[in-house]
Image (cartoon, grey):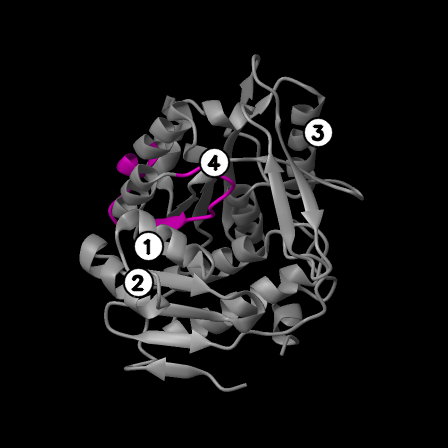
Amino acid sequence: MSQQARVKSEEPIPRGSVSAPLTIVGLGELLWDLFPSGRQLGGAPANFAYCSHLLGDNGTVVSRVGADELGNDIRESLAAFGLSDDFLQNDEEHPTGTVKVKLDKAGQPDFTITYPSAWDFLEWNPALEHLAKSADAVSYGSLAQRSPESRQTIGKFLDTVRKDTARVFDVNLRQSFYSAEVLRESFSRASIVKLNQAEVPKVATLLGFSGDDPRLFCQQAFLEFKLPLICVTRGELGSLLVSDSEEHEHPGYRVRVRDTVGSGDAFTAALVNKYLHGASLAEANDFANRMGAWLASNSGAMPPAPDEGLVAALAEIG
């Protein structure tokens, strides 16, 4: 499939390359997605951390669950997925988060999110301070900032990370759980912003930008927030990556979709992986689209690694 690029499409993303496993943090909601067929572990930051783990880095989930059966089951599930629960706080007062998920015929989800949930009360503590200082990347969204407690903790975490830590704002608008204030503050703290095409006009309106053209939106965001990288995803139609010196557009990969829950988070994990390793926009965009397509061809947001290995499975897509 053809790919289109503007200016220096093979130049590396402006970030130093690395080789050792990195500490990649998903910061925010962790919950059970309640499908008609049963429950599956989910939450965008947790999905991101899991996919980062599949890609060979130290995916770390930072969240909060209730002191209940659902919370205990989450801890057991994380262990089964190979993820630590060291930064999973326990809440004696609020229940573990749940989301009712309905899928349409194309596998597109509709979410009904329980409020309040334990992850709305994420607390800052010395363990999180230590983790923040050692993190190589952290992904956060708007949903976990719907409550003042978690919003404050997320802000402290982002203010504590090193200057070279990739701070990834995965916008992830859900229901009415976002505001202009949260979006503007989150953009201002980010080094990478990712949102989908349907979110562009909503975010643009709240920030006072033009939402008619994703490229114009990206240009305005660059001027306002001095961002190194912005990504606009388009589902099976691919994605647009824009840096301060170039852009790259990918047409996407079409696969047999089981459901799309978590595919955007898988995309983000792969994009960040390539960003941290100094890949070009073209390489990062292709790899991220492959990862998102692979996830969509599976059921749930945290499918097991394929028998033939993830890298081999991704290479077969297309």
Q: Which residue is mark 1?
A: 204
Q: Which residue is mark 4?
A: 28
Q: Are marks 4 and 2 in contact (CB under 8 Å)?
A: no
* First of labels 4, 1 by sequence position: 4
Mark 4 or mark 2, whichever is nearer to me:
2
Range covered by the magenta-colored residues: 157-178
Considering the image in quadrants, where does the N terminus appear? bottom right
Separation of residues labelled 4 and 3 (CA atoms): 18 Å
- Name the spot of residue 86 as percent of width and height, x first: 53, 29
Mark 4 or mark 3, whichever is nearer to me:
4
Q: Are marks 4 and 1 in contact (CB under 8 Å)?
A: no
Mark 1 or mark 3, whichever is nearer to me:
1
Separation of residues labelled 4 and 1 (CA atoms): 24 Å
* First of labels 4, 3 by sequence position: 4
Asked if 30 appears above or below 257 in the picture, the reply is above
* First of labels 3, 2 by sequence position: 3
Compare residues 201 and 188 and report the one nearer the observer: 201
Asked if 295 appears above or below 302 in the picture, the reply is below
Q: Using a 10 Å C-alpha cutoff, classify the residue at mark 4 as few (fewer than 14 neighbours), some (14 to 19) or many (20 or more).
A: many
* First of labels 2, 1 by sequence position: 1
Separation of residues labelled 4 and 2 (CA atoms): 26 Å
Q: Which residue is mark 2?
A: 217
